[in-house]
């Protein structure tokens, strides 16, 4: 049985801070796309950071493959997390007119493959920059 590595303190504090920001955002009567997208990106990056510390198997991959995989998980996870946050806020508020209509939530979710591809490209670019 393999025991996962301990997460660093900064990652735990960053996760706590992002949770507090998300709870504050959920209470606001705000329905902007930019804010929920930024929080989705932060949530995806936090998830990838936690995954990297919990499962060190990615450390054995080549740099370009590792960076591309991290980019794909970050990009695809960002769109998916933003759609999930939109859905959560719509369900919690339960107005007659929703904060985020179903078409907006679905259009964010359908961008997941495109954002994952963009993440792969950014990951490969980071690997190329790092290799110089």
Image: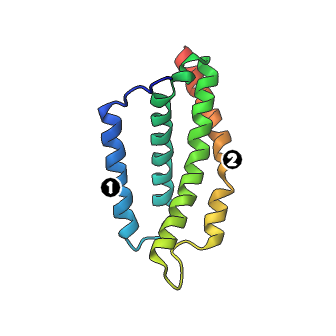
Tell me the tag on residue 20: 1
Question: Where does the image place residue 16, in percent across and percent down from the top left?
Answer: 32, 47
Please give the residue where the numbered disc 2 appears in the rendered image: 114
Residue 85 against residue 102 in the figure, above or below: above
**Residue at 45% from the left image edge and 29% from the top image edge:** 53
Indicate left or right for 42 with 129 as reference.
left
Tell me the tag on residue 46: none
Spot the residue most to the bottom: 96
Earlier sequence position, callout 2 versus callout 1: 1
**Residue at 39% from the left image edge and 58% from the top image edge:** 22
Badge count = 2
Spot the residue most to the top: 132
Q: Secondary structure at mark 2?
A: helix
Q: Nearer the viewer, mark 2 or mark 1?
A: 1
Marks 2 and 1 sit apart, C-alpha to C-alpha, by: 29 Å
Residue 97 against residue 19 in the figure, above or below: below
Question: Where does the image place residue 13, in percent across and percent down from the top left?
Answer: 30, 41
């Amino acid at each position: 049985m393999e025991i996962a590595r301990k997460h660093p303190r900064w990652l735990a504090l960053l996760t706590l801070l992002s949770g507090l920001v998300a709870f504050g955002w959920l209470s606001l009567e705000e329905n902007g796309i930019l804010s929920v997208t930024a929080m989705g990106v932060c949530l995806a990056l936090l998830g990838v950071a936690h995954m990297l510390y919990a499962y060190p198997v990615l450390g054995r991959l080549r740099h370009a493959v590792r960076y591309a995989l991290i980019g794909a998980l970050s990009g695809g996870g960002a769109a998916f997390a933003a759609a999930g946050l939109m859905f959560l806020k719509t369900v919690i508020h339960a107005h007659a007119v929703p904060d985020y209509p179903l078409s907006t939530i679905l259009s964010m979710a359908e961008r997941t493959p495109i954002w994952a591809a963009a993440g792969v490209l950014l990951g490969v670019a980071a690997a190329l920059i790092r290799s110089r």
